[in-house]
Every structure is written in structure tokens, then in C-alpha cells.
Amino acid sequence: MQDIKKIQRAKKGNNKAFQELIEDEKIKLYKIAYIYMKNEDDALEVFQETIYKAFISIKNLKDERYFSTWLSRILINTAIDLINKKKRIIPMEIKSIEEKLAPYQTNKKDPDLLQAVMELDEKYKTVLILRFYKDYTVKQIADVLDYPEGTVKTNIHRGINLLKEKLKEDCVNE
């Protein structure tokens, strides 16, 4: 495992190894930050703060296998902290979101689905992003969010049902 060795080197203070690890994760991290913050400036702020926090605390990482999960958890907590700090929600048109994400997307997402996900409560949006975008297992999501696995399963199930209802309503109204 090349990454495990890189992580071990980074934990020992090798800045180049840390940079290489971040290079591998940066697009995923930015996408998640953007989904949370809904604007480029705040997403970049969260991304930058996440990298800083990871850099200063990487020596505390207990299990190298969970580096990506650990990094995602830092990002999510940083995003939620910033949202709470600013106490604001910025409504953004789906077209604007698609334009910002276009260079990073490998396949075209259904805009109705993306719109519906963006309208979900944070707890449902978070588990659905981690489960279906990052392909995390229920256990990994529970670890990242510090929730019991049962709560994660419930939130995934409820989130999917809310999406189905929302998309059905949209189809009926058209």
C-alpha cells in the first residue's frame, strides 16, 4: 500500500508526502465543501481550513487506513462550524451550482436529482452525499459523523424516501 507509506511519512513530518496525499483528495474535498457552503468563496475557505487542520494534526491520526475518512470528517465539521458561525443560508440556483461544478464532474448528474438533494435537511444530505457520492459504507459514515450505525441507516432510508416524494411531486406538477 503506497498510500499507507505516504501517510506514515506525512505523520513523521514529511511535507511532500502530505502534499501528495492532499493532491489525491483535493477534488473530492472541494466538491463536498461546495455542496455544503453553496458558494465558491466559502467552499474554498472550508477547503483551506481543512487542509490546515489536517496538516497540524496528522500526527494524531490513529489508523492510516482511514486517512480519507478522517479528512472528510475534518471538512464536514469545518463546514458546519462555518455555517453556524455565519448563521446564514445562501440560496443558489441549480444552474449556478452546475456551472461551478462542471469542470470537476466526470459524468453529468440529473439536475432534478441534484436540486432535490440540495433541498434536503443537512442530516439527510450529508449521509446521502457520503453514501452515494463518496461510496462510504454505513460504518464509515457512522465513524465520520460520530453517529450510531442505526441512525445512519435511518437517515439514508428517510433521505431516499424524501427524494422519491420530491421527484414524484415534480413529475406530477409538470
Image (cartoon, rainbow, N blue to C red):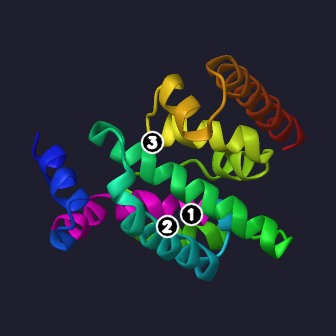
For marks 3 and 1, the one nearer the N-term is 1
Considering only vertical position in the picture, is 52 above or below 160?
A: below
Q: Which residue is at the front of the view, 149 or 156?
A: 149
Disc 3: which residue: 134
Q: Is residue 130 visible?
A: yes
**For the magenta stretch, what is the residue range?**
17-35
Residue 33 is tagged as: 1
The residue lying at 48 percent from left, 31 percent from top is 140
Quadrant of the snapshot with the N terminus: top left
Q: Mark 1 or mark 2: which is in front?
A: 2
In the displayed structure image, the side of residue 91 where residue 61 appears, left or right: left
Asked whether the beta carbons under mark 1 and mark 2 sit within 8 Å of each other, the answer is yes
The secondary element bearing badge 1 is classed as helix
- Cα distance in 3D space between marks 3 and 2: 17 Å
Q: Which residue is at the front of the view, 37 or 141?
A: 141
- Cα distance in 3D space between marks 3 and 1: 13 Å
Considering only vertical position in the picture, is 69 above or below 152?
A: below
